[in-house]
Amino acid sequence: MNLEKVVFGFFILLAATLNFGFVIGEIDNAVHHDVYELAAAVVVSLIATVLKLGDRTHMGAVLLATSLVADLQLIAAAVVWAIAEHVYALGEAPRVITSVVSLASGAALANMASVVLLIAETISLRR
């Protein structure tokens, strides 16, 4: 068993599941979306991106692109929430939460694409 591949797969799947966990629920209900879960999704997604940097194959480039999209959208979601909370003092207004969850949903889609690509690559490998 290749430990590097296990860690790589672990972080890709963890990024996707954390992102999915944050997104699931009523889109405008702040009770269903925890700020710490969003923070964990951002951190794990960034770790997954760093792990994808060394792969020089075409599949590696596509995996890196999906990860960068997820990072960009998760960071944008965190920034929107932070600005709404601390600059405009809107708190957890439904329109703010809707924007945050919408951005995180885009990241979830990118993460799911990454998982599908990882599975496709794994299936295509021969012993």
Image: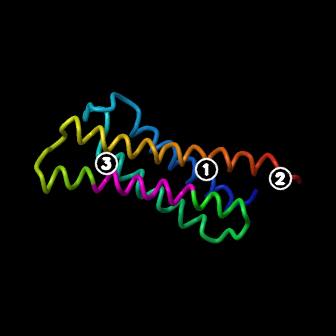
> Dots 2 and 1: beta carbons under 8 Å?
no
Tag on residue 125? Answer: 2
* Precedes in sequence: disc 3 or disc 1: 3
Tag on residue 114? Answer: 1
Q: Secondary structure at mark 3?
A: helix
Q: Secondary structure at mark 2?
A: loop
* Precedes in sequence: disc 2 or disc 1: 1
On screen, residue 57 above or below 29: below
Image position, residue 86 (x, y; %): 14, 55
In the image, is 94 to the left or to the right of 54? left
Q: Quadrant of residue 52?
A: bottom right
On screen, residue 52 above or below 80: below
Q: Residues within 10 Å of mark 3 (few under 14, many from 20)?
A: few
Residue where numbered disc 3 is placed = 36
Disc 3/disc 2 C-alpha distance (Å): 37 Å
Tag on residue 76? Answer: none
Image position, residue 56 (x, y; %): 70, 70
Q: Residue at x 40, y 37 (%)?
A: 23
Q: Nearer the viewer, mark 3 or mark 1?
A: 1
Hey, what amino acid is under mark 1? Ser
Which part of the image, by quadrant, shows the C terminus?
bottom right
In the image, is 52 to the left or to the right of 26? right
Closer to the camera, 79 or 1?
A: 79
Q: Residue at x 43, y 38 (%)?
A: 21
In reply to whether residue 77 is colored magenta, the answer given is: yes
Q: How is the image coloured?
A: rainbow
* Precedes in sequence: disc 3 or disc 2: 3
Hey, what amino acid is under mark 3? Tyr
In reply to whether residue 43 is colored magenta, the answer given is: no
Q: Residue at x 68, y 68 (%)?
A: 55
Image position, residue 65 (x, y; %): 58, 60
Start and end of the magenta stretch? 66-79
